[in-house]
Image: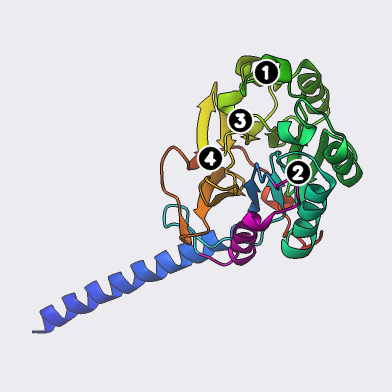
Amino acid sequence: MRIVQKRFMTITLSVICLLASAMCAGQALAGEAALTFFGWSDQHIQTNGDGRHLLPAIEGMNSLPGVKYPASVGGKVAEPAFVFGCGDITEWPTTAAKRTYEELITKRLKFRSYDIVGNHDEGGKVPSETMKSWIIARHGALTYTFDKGGVHFIALFSKYDESLNSPAQPITKEALDFVRRDLAKVPKNMPVVVAAHLCFDAMTNRAEVVKAFGDANVILVLGGHYHKSKVDKYVGVNFVQLPSPAPNSPNEFTVIRITSDRLVAIPYDYEKKKWVNSPVKVLDVAVKGPDKADIAVPARTK
């Protein structure tokens, strides 16, 4: 009887120790230094300024911090350092559309927002400077850079060529020249994220794009344009296509989480309030990320 009791106690203690270890591991993961940001694209605010279709996505972003990630990721969603938009803010760049978007991202969205110009924002066959001027006023240039949490970001403008009559386009020479010049000034091991409007499937000169990175530590290329979540890997470079909140598009935005050794990009369905688990939409890879000391807690600033 005593032998049975001793064995029972030994097993019980072992189970308790395992549970305690798992809890500690979970707490450590949840508190792990990470840079978190949200991504979306192709908002397509209407020419009359109607942007009501963006409200569910914005509310989804505002309420997501604190929600548990899937078990495969671990931990909870931190407050994002910012939200990044990959262009096509407007259906066509009217002043009404611009005003609506500005009001939504400054008064409804709780987090800072960075954006780039998409082909619709250029005005298509009836060019307009409205959204270009807004981006320049807000970020200093059509193509600009910024650093967050030990990561260098390149927000890239690549002029769309309407004469090609195709949604698939090359990233322009001017844009790639900027990338080369900028990366030449970035510390060699610093992780870099490049964002353009064109997604992987729409880039007709992918080899040139990747070649422009040289030996820089480019851990991620973001794009939009095709309205749905998708991930690709090309010559060792990770590409993530950001989803659209426009009508007839998936009700998703993407959460990107970067630690010192891991990159996760996973879409969240804000209508169903659940994570998307499709392998063609989720990226979870090892990377050489920022030093833990460089990953700062984001401040909620506009």
For the residue pair 235 and 12, the one nearer the viewer reads as 235
Q: Is residue 58 magenta?
A: yes
- Badge 3 is on which residue? 199
Separation of residues labelled 4 and 2 (CA atoms):
18 Å
Could you tell me the amino acid type at mark 1?
Pro
Q: Earlier in the sequence, mark 4 or mark 2?
A: 2
Rounded to the nearest angstrom, the CA distance separating label 2 from label 1 is 20 Å
Q: Residues within 10 Å of mark 2 (few under 14, many from 20)?
A: many
Residue 301: x and y in percent read 81, 61
Q: How many marks?
A: 4
Label 3 to label 2: alpha-carbon separation = 15 Å
* Residue type marked 2: Asp
Point out the tag, 3 or 2, that comes first from the N-terminus: 2
Residue range highlighted in magenta: 45-67
**Label 3: how many residues lie within 10 Å, few (<14), some (14-19) or many (20+)?**
many
Name the residue tied to disc 1: 170
Given the current orientation, which residue lies at the most extreme bottom position? 1
Left or right, residue 168 beside residue 181: left
Q: Is residue 145 left or right of residue 280?
A: right
Indicate which label's residue lies in the foreground, 3 or 4: 4
Dot 4 falls on a residue whose secondary structure is: loop
The label shown at residue 228 is 4
Q: Amino acid at mark 4?
A: Lys
Which element carries disc 1, helix, strand or loop?
loop
Q: Amino acid at mark 3?
A: Cys
How packed mark 1 is, by other alpha carbons closer than 10 Å (few <14, some 14-19, many 20 or more), is some
